[in-house]
Image (cartoon, rainbow, N blue to C red):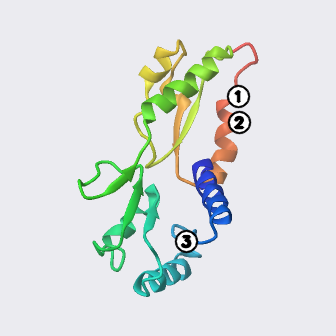
Amino acid sequence: WSVFDDVMVREAKALQQAEPQREFQFFTGTNDSRERTRVLSRMQRDVLGDRLAGLIIPPLCQDLAGCAPYNDPKLPKVFLFRKPALSSELTVSGDGDAIIDRSLKHLADRGCRRVAAIRVRGAYSGLGSAHFERQGLSFRPQWMQVVERGDTVVLSTLIPLLMDYPERQ
């Protein structure tokens, strides 16, 4: 679950409140082994019962679009951050390079010179040394770590490790 997901839900709820004729169903938990069966069952009932106008499918759920009943071409779908998109698919995507460059510029403008990064496996993978160098930041491969989504145990030890330099560094 990311800040992006939080914003999507918050904005959908705000739209629903402003326009009560619109209704959003949130099927969260499709990647959670404890919740997956229950959530997919509910979603499948709604799709088969023709109770959904369409699906907005985030990156880690896009495998569902290939399975029945979600693969029905008559069921409208919008994919978030899917590459490459088929010509018949509607895809909403961001410019990953621009987001990374702006983020690193923000840090460089505030005097940071050595920046570590933790990215989620399967998410934007184009982050590399060139992004850091464009902003005048030092880069070392060990400062770039990849974790699984939701792996809080690894994060709880990885973040202190990346921050474990003498203050002058």
Query: Looking at the picture, how far across and down is residue 9, in whole percent?
Result: 62, 59
**Residue to which mark 2 is pinned:** 160
Viewer-proximal residue among 16 and 2? 16
Q: Quick check: marks 2 and 3 in contact, CB under 8 Å?
A: no
Report the label total: 3
Q: CA distance from mark 2 to mark 1?
A: 6 Å
Q: Residue at 46% of width from left, 46% of height from top?
A: 123
Query: Looking at the picture, how far across and down is residue 141, in whole percent?
Result: 48, 27
Viewer-proximal residue among 86 and 135? 86
Query: Looking at the picture, how far across and down is residue 147, in whole percent?
Result: 53, 47
Say which of marks 2 and 3 sits in front. Answer: 3
Mark 1 element type: loop
Rate crowding at label 1 as few (under 14), some (14 to 19) or many (20 or more) other CA atoms within 10 Å: few
Mark 2 element type: helix
Viewer-proximal residue among 20 and 162? 20
| The disc label shown at residue 164, or none | 1
Q: Residue at 68% of width from left, 43% of height from top?
A: 157
Q: Is residue 156 above or below residue 36?
A: above
Q: Is residue 51 above or below residue 102?
A: below
Q: Is residue 102 above or below residue 72?
A: above
Which circle's residue, 1 or 3, is located before the other in the chain? 3
Mark 3 element type: loop
**Residue to which mark 3 is pinned:** 27
Q: Quadrant of residue 70?
A: bottom left
- Quarter of the image containing the C terminus? top right
